[in-house]
Every structure is written in C-alpha cells, then in structure tokens.
Amino acid sequence: MSHVRGIGLMCLMSLLAQVARADISSEIAQASEPLAEGVPEVAVARLQALLNNKLPESEWRAGVEKLAEAQIAAKHPENTLTLLADIRVRELPWAKFWCAQAFASLHRWSDALPLYEQLANDAGSPFRNAATFGEAETLRALARREEALKKFMLLIHDKEWAARAQLRAAELYIETGDATGARRLLEEMQPASIAERRERRVLRGRLELLQRRPERAIGIFQGLLKRPEGAAHPALISAVLGIAEAQMQLKTPEIADDVVEQFIDRHPADPDLPLLFARLDELYRAEHKPSRNELERWVRSPEQPRRTFARWYLARLEIRAGRRERARQLFTDLRHTTLKSQAFAPAFLELAQFEIEDKHFDEAIAILEEARSFHPESSLLARIDFLSAQAQYLARRFDRSAADFEQIARSRSPWAKIALFNASTGWLQLGNHARFLIDYAELEKAGGNGEARADLRLEEGLLQATKGDERAERSLQQFIHDFPKSPRVSEALVSLAELAFHASPPRLDEARTYLTRAAESPTAAAAERGDYLNIWIVGRALLPPPGFRERTDAV
C-alpha cells in the first residue's frame, strides 16, 4: 500500500509559506494568490502573463520562483524543468529545490536525489529540512529503506516536520514488518492537523493488518470513510484498499472487490483510478469465477476516464478467459479513445504484446509508437523501447533490431545487458561477425553472466553450421573448451556430429563419438536431434560400400 507515499510529497508543499520571498512585488503576490487557494492552474496563467512583461531582474526571478512552485502544484513538472533551465536561475538554491521536486514528480528519483542531498547538507539554506524530507522520500522510492529511515529520524525533533517525519517513518516500519517500531512512533507523535490525525488512523489500520487482525483494521478504515472530513485523498484511498486487503485476509475476495467497485462507481473520475483498477484486477485474479458485471456496465457508461480503464481491465479478463477476439475489440476501442493520459500508456504496451503473440509485428510496432506519444515515465519507456526492438527481431528485421538493442544497451535501461545479448544474436543472424564480436566483448566487459555469454558463443557456432560456414566446427569446439560446464554442451556435440555425418566422405565413427558424449547429459533439443541423427547413421551403415555392385546372375 505504498500509495500513501503521495501524502509525503504533498507535505512538502507546506514549505511554501515559510520560504516565500520577503521582497516579492505586490503584482507577483496577487498573481500567486490562487496557489494558496488551491487553484494553481490559475496562478500559473497569471504568473506566465506577468513574466511576459519586462520586469526588473529581482522581480523576474521572484516571479519565476512562484511560477515553478505553481507548476509543481498544478502537476506540470516537465514545464518546471524547462523553466528552471535558464542560466539566470538554475544555480540558485530555490531553483534546485523545485527541480528536485519536478524530478520526484516524474519519478526520476536518481536525478532528484543529488539535488536534495546538496540542499540538505547546506546548514544555512531555508530549504534544508524540506530537502531532507524529500531526500528521505527519494531514498524510499529507490528501495533504500534504512537510509530513508535515518533521514526521517533527523526530523522527528523539529517542531515543523516532526509529525510528518514520524508518519513516514512509521510507514517504513510497517513496510518492513516492524510492528513495534511503527506502534511506538504512532503513539509518540502529536499530529498538528486533522489531515495528520486521519493519516495516523490509516497507519494504525495498516498496523492491524500487519498483525493479522483484519476485523480491527476494517473498523478503523470504515470509521475514517464515514467521517472523511479533513483527510487527504491518498488517506481515503488507503482506507478503501485497506478494507479490501482485510477482506482478503478473511478469505472473502468477493467482498473485497465489492469495496473497490463501489468506490469506483461513486468516483468515475478519481485521480487514483489507475491504482484502484490495478488492485481490482488483482482481486479478480484471486477469485475462482470473478464477476464481470461492473466492468461491462462501466464500458457502456459514458463517464471518463472510468470507461477507458474498464475497457482495459475487461480486456485483461477476456484474455485470461481465452476470449481473444472480444479482448481485441476492447483494446481497439481503447486505442481510439480521445483521452491522452500517461496512465493509459501501459494499456498500449499490453496491446502491443497481445499483437506480438498473434504475430502482428508491424501493428505492435505502430502501437508502441503511439504509447510513446503519451510521454510515459522512464521505466515504462524503457519497456516500450525493448518490446519494439523485440518486435523488429521477430519480424526478422535483424539490422533494425540489432541497432535498437544496441541503443538500449548504451542507456540506463534495466535491460541493458539483455539488450546487448539480443543485439549480438541479431548480428549473428545477419552474418555480421565483426559486429557480433564487438557486442560480445562489451557484454563480457559489462559483467554479463556466463550462461548468457555461453549461449551467444553456441548460437554463433550453430548458425555457422546451418549456413555451411567452414568456421562452424572450430567455433563449436571452442565453445566446448571455454564453457565445459554449460548445460548446452550436448547441443554443440550433436551439431558437431551432424557436421561429421554430412562431411564428404562421412565421418561416421566421429559422429557416433560425439553423439555418445552428448547422450551423457543432453538437453531436450540435443536429445531430439541426436535421436534423429542416430537413425540416419544406422541407415547409412547398412548401405553397401561405394563401388559395390550386387550380383544378379544365378549361382
């Protein structure tokens, strides 16, 4: 239930009042007023109009600072990064802070972390505590929980930040299964606002779930939903999903999905629909015969974005039920939606995978191009790039595929090493031995595992054998020498046996020796090919020797 993390980033917004510039002009202050009133989009428009006028340098910088703040609040972090790239402001502490906030909003945690660290280490910066909080949230997002906990603990004695830091630290304890640590912090904290009290209640409910007391958890969550006044939206979502999780602990998944469905039914445009539908899909998977009634009803209803999410997840349900044509129609309808939200980029990725499974490679590549137009976050974009290169490979466009995989290999993609392996196989398919060796050397240098390197060397020899390349025998022998413990040595031995059998003249004894060695520990592929070759060897042995002429005259 890491969605509560959204509250942490929201908490940083409270910093704004404390760090507002004292010398801000009355015009900028007036243009910024909608930000404090909860309508940052209006503030963005007013500040942009103001900055289009010629302002003194100091006032221009003050306006840029408030505009960056408003853009973050309005959820336009890309615009913030563009705004703060200006050489006149980019090295200023407040610019670094809002850049870090923008990176965090985009889940570009590795970019946000050094900026937060720099500000957190500056004892004189008014952003120091806010940056420490942001640093802790970023470390948690990077799964560096122990470091994150230490950063939160630095703030628990600070009057302004104590409650928020204790909430986040308690959540970390719950995530790591430390019920004692979480309970201690929740009992010690003194929430200063209704929102903090509501969030503490959510965490107490999660603590009951951790201790396998689902009935108590349900009571806590239901109490919050009955009296939601003052609760932050992520806390309400946590309560809904907490009840569903509690029902799962009680082994009543049909009640669990009812809870989520009812919330979605009442809130068809909720900003957390991606999270709610994903959880609903998990619940459907847990049920023996899930009902599709609500999804079907939402597909027929005009309310958006719920209708588009319903098409997506109903398509998933149809695929699992084996009704692929119905799934294709739902995906097609989804593809033609006018909604261009980043939240739907994963649906296009799934549709592309669906088309690849049906061998519609060009269609899959076109869909992946559309997915890129949604400006997906970096982790999803990496998956899109990899799947696109894979589709090119399956379409036997090995030159394009190998080039795409090489580009992925040189990026920070989590699939960089796999991409380098795939690029190497692409060059093998093209017979480009020089490029294969370059990529193979890079894979070896990058620490590619021994099994992957062994597979590449074997594929090199097998492809050479298939094409009648005279280097095949030497490559296969070298593979066996370099990787004697590879489970695929038997496949190399069978291939050597085939080369010996097809030699002119055939080297039958040599072929039998290779097959005998291969039979000691064969893979399934080696066993099948070896048995087939044995039949031919036996048949060849029964043939009369060359030059023999059978006598037909009577004795």
Image (cartoon, rainbow, N blue to C red):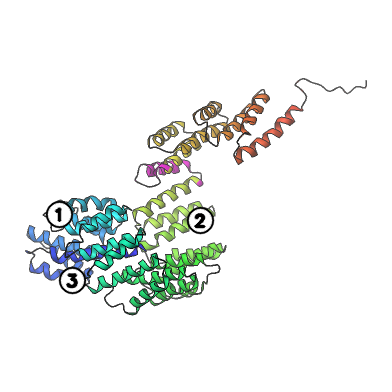
Quadrant placement of the C terminus: top right
Task: List the residue tagged with mark 3.
Answer: 36
Quadrant placement of the N terminus: bottom left
Among numbered discs 2 and 1, the one appearing first in the sequence: 1
Answer yes or no: is residue 108 visible. no
Relative placement, left or right, of 69 versus 386 is left
What is the residue that sits farthest to the right in this orientation? 555
| SS majority, magenta | helix
96 above or below 30?
Answer: above
Residue 387 x, y percent position in the rendering: 44, 50
| Distance from Cα at disc 3 to Cα at disc 1 | 22 Å
Residue 144 x, y percent position in the rendering: 31, 52
Task: Name the foreground residue: 358 vs 527.
Answer: 527
| Distance from Cα at disc 3 to Cα at disc 2 | 48 Å
Q: Please tell me whether mark 3 sits on a helix, a strand or a loop.
A: helix
Taking the magenta stretch, the answer to whether it contains residue 538 is no
Among numbered discs 3 and 2, the one appearing first in the sequence: 3
The crowd level at tag 1 (other Cα within 10 Å; few <14, some 14-19, many 20+) is: some
| Distance from Cα at disc 2 to Cα at disc 1 | 49 Å
Q: Amino acid at mark 3?
A: Ala
- Kindly identify the residue that appears in the image at 58 percent across and 35 percent down: 491
Q: Please tell me whether mark 1 sits on a helix, a strand or a loop.
A: helix
Q: Which residues are magenta?
A: 394-417
Q: Amino acid at mark 2?
A: Glu
Residue 316 x, y percent position in the rendering: 49, 63
Answer yes or no: is residue 174 visible. yes
Residue 79 x, y percent position in the rendering: 24, 59
Q: Please tell me whether mark 2 sits on a helix, a strand or a loop.
A: helix
Taking the magenta stretch, the answer to whether it contains residue 409 is yes
Nearest to viewer (mark 2 / mark 1): 1
Task: List the residue tagged with mark 1.
Answer: 93
Task: List the residue tagged with mark 2.
Answer: 355
